[in-house]
């Protein structure tokens, strides 16, 4: 059975971490509670990761596509920064994809409350700053996560930061694309999965699907949707938006380099945000 590049890299990094006690970051679950207490007192950032364990990404990609990017970014953080990474949240609120088989918390308030209670617990246990990593986008899963982060900030005084996928994208990623437009299960996401887990990608099922390309030339937030309802203008037979046929693992590697660089930059910047004075 073939093993993906990602699993090979991830396993090698885990072995390296186990052998090297000087690695800056730590996974909370790997610590004893006395070790965790000490880490909370000195680590500038605690990361609460969210990435869908199952969410449709078209007929050609596995539903774990968000989670594997989350894992990749977390490993980069732990290798480079003095962070604590909590166990991930793998279930989320995905109304745009609700018509497709997969896993979702359909009530946004349940998801928001869950995220907030996790963060409140960490703040009460001594977290100095809390970062929520969201491998969804800012105006989807980022909405309830951001409300939770704001409440934690107000109620506890602990600085919070929400970093979503689109916060990490730059013009460099746009320059990699040959597709006309994209955004889900598209050229870039497929390329990333071809690089991380090629054995789970079926390029024989990859399609071009631009759906409704009506240009929006007015302001405001227009929630998007991909639906299997053929009477809806947002109908999608594939569940993607973009051209997955143009994907290559080389594009995926380059895109990940950009995302990782911007992720580490955000962590380094947030680590300097002033804390409350405890007089």
Image: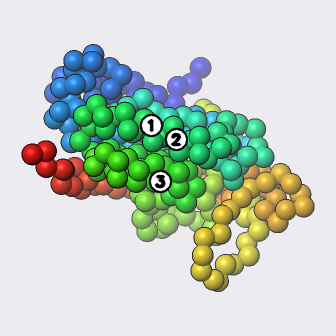
> In the image as oriented, which residue stretches furthest toward the bottom?
217
Classify 10 Å Cα crowding around label 3: few (below 14), some (14-19), many (20 and above). some
> Looking at the picture, does residue 217 appear above or below residue 200?
below
Judging depth in this view, the residue of 14 and 119 nearest the camera is: 119
User: Which label belongs to residue 117?
Assistant: 1
Instruction: Quote the CA–CA distance across marks 2 and 1.
Output: 6 Å
- Tell me what residue is drawn at x 36 percent, y 22 percent: 29
Instruction: Quote the CA–CA distance across marks 2 and 3.
Output: 10 Å
Specify whether 92 is left or right of 86: right
- Tell me what residue is drawn at x 52 percent, y 41 percent: 113
Percent of width and height locating residue 276: 18, 50
Do callouts 2 and 1 mark residues in contact (Cβ within 8 Å)? yes
Classify 10 Å Cα crowding around label 2: few (below 14), some (14-19), many (20 and above). some
Classify 10 Å Cα crowding around label 1: few (below 14), some (14-19), many (20 and above). few
- Report helix, strand or loop for mark 1: helix
User: Which label belongs to residue 113?
Assistant: 2
Percent of width and height locating residue 273: 21, 55
Q: Is residue 164 visible?
A: no
Q: Is residue 95 visible?
A: yes
**Mark with earlier residue (3, 1):** 1
Residue identifier under label 3: 147
Percent of width and height locating residue 152: 37, 47
Percent of width and height locating residue 57: 66, 46
- The quadrant of the picture occupied by the C terminus is top left
Judging depth in this view, the residue of 166 and 208 nearest the camera is: 166
- Report helix, strand or loop for mark 2: helix
Q: Quadrant of residue 171?
A: bottom left
> In the image as oriented, which residue stretches furthest toward the right?
231
């Amino acid at each position: 059975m073939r093993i993906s590049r990602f699993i090979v890299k991830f396993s090698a990094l885990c072995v390296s971490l186990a052998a090297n006690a000087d690695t800056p970051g730590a996974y909370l679950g790997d610590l004893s509670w006395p070790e965790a207490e000490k880490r909370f007192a000195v680590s500038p950032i605690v990361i609460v990761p969210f990435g869908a364990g199952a969410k449709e990404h078209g007929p050609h990609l596995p539903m774990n596509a968000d989670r594997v990017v989350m894992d990749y970014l977390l490993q980069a953080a732990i290798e480079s920064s003095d962070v604590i990474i909590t166990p991930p949240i793998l279930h989320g609120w995905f109304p745009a994809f609700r018509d497709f088989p997969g896993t979702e918390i359909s009530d946004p308030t349940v998801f928001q409350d869950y995220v907030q209670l996790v963060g409140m617990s960490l703040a009460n246990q001594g977290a100095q700053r809390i970062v929520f990593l969201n491998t969804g986008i800012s105006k989807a899963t980022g909405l309830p996560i951001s409300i939770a982060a704001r409440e934690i900030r107000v109620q506890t005084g602990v600085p919070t930061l929400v970093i979503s996928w689109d916060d990490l994208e730059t013009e460099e990623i746009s320059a990699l694309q040959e597709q006309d437009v994209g955004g889900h299960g598209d050229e870039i996401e497929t390329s990333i999965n071809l690089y991380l887990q090629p054995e789970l990608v079926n390029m024989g099922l990859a399609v071009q699907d631009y759906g409704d390309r009506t240009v929006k030339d007015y302001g405001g937030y227009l929630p998007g949707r991909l639906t299997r309802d053929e009477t809806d203008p947002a109908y999608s037979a594939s569940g993607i938006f973009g051209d997955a046929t143009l994907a290559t693992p080389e594009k995926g590697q380059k895109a990940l380099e950009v995302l990782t660089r911007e992720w580490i930059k955000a962590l380094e910047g947030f680590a300097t945000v002033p804390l409350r004075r405890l007089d």
